Amino acid sequence: MADQTYSLSEIVGTSSESVDAAIKNGIAAASQTLRNLDWFEVKEIRGHINEGTIADWQVTIKVGFRLER
Amino acid sequence: MADQTYSLSEIVGTSSESVDAAIKNGIAAASQTLRNLDWFEVKEIRGHINEGTIADWQVTIKVGFRLER
Amino acid sequence: MADQTYSLSEIVGTSSESVDAAIKNGIAAASQTLRNLDWFEVKEIRGHINEGTIADWQVTIKVGFRLER
Amino acid sequence: MADQTYSLSEIVGTSSESVDAAIKNGIAAASQTLRNLDWFEVKEIRGHINEGTIADWQVTIKVGFRLER
Amino acid sequence: MADQTYSLSEIVGTSSESVDAAIKNGIAAASQTLRNLDWFEVKEIRGHINEGTIADWQVTIKVGFRLER
Amino acid sequence: MADQTYSLSEIVGTSSESVDAAIKNGIAAASQTLRNLDWFEVKEIRGHINEGTIADWQVTIKVGFRLER
Amino acid sequence: MADQTYSLSEIVGTSSESVDAAIKNGIAAASQTLRNLDWFEVKEIRGHINEGTIADWQVTIKVGFRLER
Amino acid sequence: MADQTYSLSEIVGTSSESVDAAIKNGIAAASQTLRNLDWFEVKEIRGHINEGTIADWQVTIKVGFRLER
Amino acid sequence: MADQTYSLSEIVGTSSESVDAAIKNGIAAASQTLRNLDWFEVKEIRGHINEGTIADWQVTIKVGFRLER
Amino acid sequence: MADQTYSLSEIVGTSSESVDAAIKNGIAAASQTLRNLDWFEVKEIRGHINEGTIADWQVTIKVGFRLER
Amino acid sequence: MADQTYSLSEIVGTSSESVDAAIKNGIAAASQTLRNLDWFEVKEIRGHINEGTIADWQVTIKVGFRLER
Amino acid sequence: MADQTYSLSEIVGTSSESVDAAIKNGIAAASQTLRNLDWFEVKEIRGHINEGTIADWQVTIKVGFRLER
């Protein structure tokens, strides 16, 4: 059996709700164009502040997906 | 129009509840003394453990704010 | 009074629910074999993706505990 | 309103002139294939030397762009 | 003559044999979809263990390729 | 003679022109509120892109200044 | 079904032969005391030199293993 | 009871004597303007050399202090 | 002759006196439970401040020790 | 044909003018004692401030050069 | 007995064959001009790609050698 | 007046006594072959352990020196 190859793509998911929701939103968006998504790694957590409260969460993640042959 | 300048301040927000609440608490406290808060970046997530459960979450963040002229 | 010494152990807690739950699960598991757990530090947040949604969250943490004499 | 998602792409712009020109060249090239470019981050500055002078500047940048839905 | 631009893509090559073979496999797979591959950089070496022996090597690399105009 | 102490402050200078101008702008703004500025260190170079060209350069720097006694 | 927890242990495998052999030796030694070894990550590659040739390779790896309940 | 917030400030303590003295000097100077100093972290150790001996030690530290309400 | 394997353990030594004493205390404590200690690496220097003076030094070190067969 | 070997040397170029000029000055100085300079990598950008303006730019670079046989 | 001092030199070994061969070639070249080579540390693994296969491996290493008195 | 150039050299000072002594020893040794030593930066602190006590301290430093013209 041939060896698998994976590719990594870096995206920023956002949410007005929470860190977890920003990650989920990013993965949901990535899954619309990338097939065989297999894992993710969080790279950076940041966000905008508006009048003393968090306006949105921005979480940079890398997603790994299996290349098809 | 003149160019904007921003300043970064590093704070540690805490919460007995969650990572997100610790960040929100830190930003709320920062907004009491710093005006024009614009964004934040998470730098470190840690906390105290007491008898096998998390006693408090401590999240170090940098907040960026616009300097007034 | 003699000086305290602490030891650090690195574990990966997992959860199908959230980042926070993965950390809590990891600490709960660590507290079954390590006594005097005192603090934790998050080192890495990642997870598996299954059909476009997060199958599990994997959070690597270091836990610090006081060595007994 | 749904939450935005962004993608990051890593490119190396080059120039025989300057650091700034290498960055501008890289972004100009990226804008030919990527729409909605929103921000960039400099990751590495290097270059080739030929007979004691800089033959070209090579600047690695990440560009962020908004994914359309 | 116009200045060159390069793009970087991150992939994970795997092999049951060795570090070097995992890198070669990843580059071979990348060369099926990316033209003008010019250089690579190793970012991470890891793998799975099965019953005390290495089941597969996973090497994350960045590959750089020249953009055509 | 007593030993000197210095403090570090982190700011983001911006410019629509160049990396160097963004640094100069940030230092000029810092010098309006901080006395005895002595050195700076560049920490991050980024910026906004608008329609394929750089709208502004944002350079994060640390400035060191001597504390008076 | 309860969530899995993993532990990470850091070891240095050595070999007079090659990088790969040093990793294999380290994992083989670890598997004598640790059960359920699941993955490894290479952290550092170094070695001793003796009269201009490599006397031994020393590869620091982290091994992850599943905690039993 | 409300959750605590802490702030971090970065300073450079100096001494002609030793690393430890430079840290102590920096903290002593910080305590003249910052109340509730709670902990410190060493970030960088450097210094000047004059005629082959160390003229002064410069230790960059972050000090954390509790914000009052 | 078979190849050696080493293991790394991370501990935090403390002292009310100095950086060096904290390291020595940590190694002395580690040597009570770990045999064949061979080397150490300093990973972090921090401590608590009480009323403007250092209450204790906390030095995180990794100790390497040879595994017996 | 035998394989090439390169050596890396770290230098700090300075200029009262700009980042680019500091790099050029450093490479020009290096080329007076090192032959076959082939590439450079920027490692750090800093400088001195005098009365609110940049007195000099200091750019630490690594230069790579081919070893002759 | 006086205390030893060591010096570190950074070189790039290359090979068309493998990672290990590139390291060996670099050390062999270094041993022609540096005496008392004692250890090495791998810093970076990269290489050139030509028509989808690896044309050469480039491994940056630091070599440590004992200074003679 | 022409711009200064500096060079950085990396050395490991050792001592059976303390961190500070190891740094001083390294600088003293460097000053025997390098002129115009101007500053140092500590990069790594490690050492050997023998029977539960520190046999020697090894401190890796970079020393900067002004190149003469």
Image (cartoon, coloured by chain):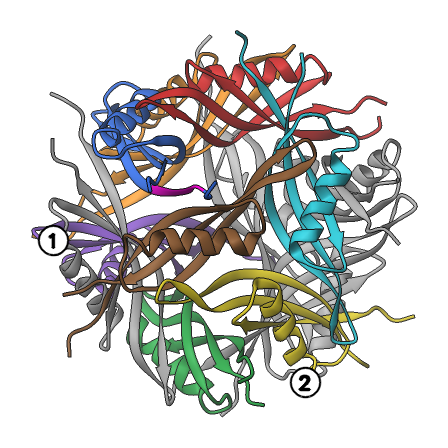
Chain colours: A yellow, B brown, C cyan, D green, H blue, I red, J purple, L orange
Percent of width and height locating residue A68: 80, 80
The amino acid pointed to by label 2 is: Thr
What segment is highlighted magenta in the picture? H4-8
Q: Main secondary structure of the magenta part?
A: strand
For mark 1, name the chain.
L
Task: Tell whether L1 sits left or right of J14.
Answer: left
Residue J22 tag number: none
Q: Mark 2: few, some, or many residues within 10 Å (few <14, many ≥20)? A: few
Indicate left or right for H35 with J69 as reference.
Answer: left
Task: Nearest to the eye among marks 2 and 1: give it.
Answer: 2
- Residue drawn 76% across and 71% down? A5
Using the image, tell me which numbered label, if any, was put on residue L2. Answer: 1
> Considering only vertical position in the picture, is J23 above or below L28?
below
Instruction: Tell me where residue C38 appears, x and y as whole percent.
Output: 61, 30
Residue D62 vertical position relative to residue I3 in the rendered view, above or below: below
Q: Which residue is mark 2?
A: A33
Count every numbered label the image shows and give the total: 2
Q: Position of residue C45 (x, y in %)?
A: 64, 55
